[in-house]
Amino acid sequence: MIVRLFRTGGLPPSENEKVVTVDDGRLAVWRSVGVPAVGSFVGQLSASESESIQALARRCVEAGDLTAPAVPDSAIDTLLLEGARVEVGQRARPDGAWGELLDLLRPLLERTDRPHAAIGLELAPDGERAWLRHLGSAALRVDLSSLRVATRLRTPTGEPGGSWATDAAGPAGQIEAGPGWEYELPFGHGFAAGDGTLTARAELVVYEREHPVVAELVASAGGRIPRLRPR
């Protein structure tokens, strides 16, 4: 049975996240908000994961459709099966098989280690430069005409240490970003190596097939976030 989880809505930039699994254990993920890389990712579920998802999906079909009210401004999780669906708030957990199935599917949104057609935000180890880089084997179309870049500094105790943002509009129109493509960002944030933690964000438009999607990337350089201080 094909199992589809869609997460949409919420505060801007709106969620547009998807998990699709098929009954041979193949996994397809689309991410667009709050992650180091956006776009499409693929994977393979373990035999036990696939069996558990399929067994719960059959129970959910027997239980029938379910809709629950969501908290205002919450993203909505819609789970579609062959013959049944559930629609609940992003953090809601229904009772029974629907809740158990959501428990298995929601963590799959974090399976972004195998990019297929994606764009990543990468920081230099010293935090002085940043790039958008293509990841995976397939091209992804992007639009940099509304590109925005921002950084935020936190002290070792977690206190605000400064912030910086700029509208960094790039070339107008769609760009076919394929293997080897990269784009260096304007990154004049005014911080230098030292104590503190720098978080970088970039907002741009990516295309899911023919649909433009506002994407938000959060910087991470190989899992390391540079420690910085204001100049």
Image: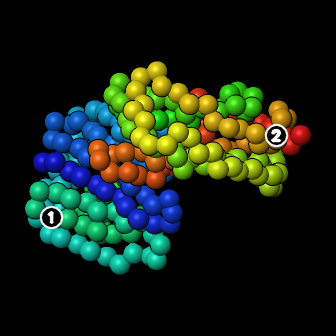
Q: CA distance from mark 2 to mark 1?
A: 52 Å
Specify few, some or many for label 2: CA neighbours under 10 Å numbering under 14, 14-19, or 20 or more: many
Q: Residue 191 got which mark?
A: 2
Q: Position of residue 200 (x, y in %)?
A: 65, 44
Q: Image quadrant for the C terminus?
A: top right
Q: Secondary structure at mark 1?
A: strand
**Location of residue 98 (image quadrant):** bottom left
Horizontal arrangement in the rendering, residue 39 relative to residue 56 (left or right):
right
Q: Residue 84 got which mark?
A: 1
Q: Amino acid at mark 1?
A: Ala
Q: Secondary structure at mark 2?
A: strand
Q: Position of residue 174 (x, y in %)?
A: 41, 40
In the rendered image, the residue lying farthest to the front is 172
Q: Nearer the viewer, residue 129 or 177?
A: 177
Q: Amino acid at mark 2?
A: Phe
Lower position in the chain sequence, tag 2 or tag 1: 1
